[in-house]
Amino acid sequence: MINIAQIKGKEFLEVQKLAGKIDGIVQHPQHIYKIMADHFGDTFFIARDESECDKILGFLLGFISRKIKGQLFIWQIGVSEAAQGKGIGSKLLEHTIDYGKKAMDCNAIMATVETTNKPSQHLFENFNFEIASSVFLDSYQTLIDADGKEAVENYYNSGTDQIFYHLELE
Ligand SMILES: CC(C)(COP(=O)(O)OP(=O)(O)OC[C@H]1O[C@@H](n2cnc3c(N)ncnc32)[C@H](O)[C@@H]1OP(=O)(O)O)[C@@H](O)C(=O)NCCC(=O)NCCS
């Protein structure tokens, strides 16, 4: 059975290691995960597998934006490659949505997904996230069409184009 919980203690070390093994995720240095756990740990969730001695199989790293009021921004979501496609990413996202609905300072969730990352796009679309790239791009940035989806060209200046996903919470 998969359990989702807020990150605690030294779990940031395991998360950082896991991030390094998942293709498609940027592995940040340990201190980034530590700072996020210490200061934004309310929206930093981990998925553990009870049947595998509580091994961490996935994580979702988010924070509630102070600049764009009320938005919970999902920075990273990752599931161990061997465990992908088994519903763990969906559980992490569902848990985050439930958290956002209860949080007083949150009324929406947003995430950016690379135009080439189809699994991640499916994940957000399954939860009725809407594409909102035109709402969140900066004035110096350009909107492009990516297989019929509106995206922002080179959003992070890292050479990748990003689709903005957005979910209004009731
Ligand atoms: C994106 C990711 C978090 C999804 O987690 P997951 O546990 O594999 O997802 P789930 O099993 O809950 O499946 C959710 C949806 O993702 C899609 N999906 C998952 N694995 C997929 C695959 N290998 N190929 C295509 N689609 C896939 C499916 O559409 C699925 O929905 P469906 O079952 O209704 O078709 C995971 O694939 C991952 O870690 N990818 C690499 C890291 C990454 O790209 N993170 C996002 C950017 S930060």
Image (cartoon, helix red, strand yellow):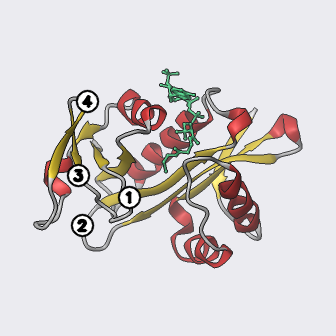
Mark 2 / mark 1, whichever is N-terminal: 2
Reading the image, the residue beneath label 2 is 68
Cβ–Cβ under 8 Å for marks 3 and 2:
no
- Please report the residue visible at 23 percent of the width from the left and 52 percent of the height from the top: 152
Instruction: Say whether residue 158 is left or right of residue 14.
Output: left
Where in the figure is residue 123, as x and y percent of width and height? Answer: 45, 33
Q: Residues within 10 Å of mark 1 (few under 14, many from 20)?
A: many
Cβ–Cβ under 8 Å for marks 2 and 1:
yes
- Please report the residue visible at 20 percent of the width from the left and 45 percent of the height from the top: 132
Where in the figure is residue 161, as x and y percent of width and height? Answer: 31, 50
The disc labelled 2 sits on which kind of residue? Ile
- In space, the residues marked 1 and 3 are separated at their CA atoms by 17 Å
Reading the image, the residue beneath label 1 is 73
Picture layout, residue 169 above or below residue 83:
below
Mark 4 / mark 3, whichever is N-terminal: 4
The disc labelled 1 sits on which kind of residue? Phe
Which is nearer the eye, 165 or 38?
Answer: 165
Mark 1 / mark 4, whichever is N-terminal: 1
- In space, the residues marked 2 and 1 are separated at their CA atoms by 9 Å
- Secondary structure, mark 4, is loop
Q: Which mark is residue 147?
A: 4
Reading the image, the residue beneath label 3 is 152
- In space, the residues marked 1 and 4 are separated at their CA atoms by 24 Å
Mark 4 / mark 2, whichever is N-terminal: 2
Which is nearer the eye, 169 or 44?
Answer: 44
Where in the figure is residue 53, as x and y percent of width and height? Answer: 89, 43
User: Which one is in front in this view, the residue at disc 1 or the one at disc 4?
Assistant: 4
Mark 1 / mark 3, whichever is N-terminal: 1
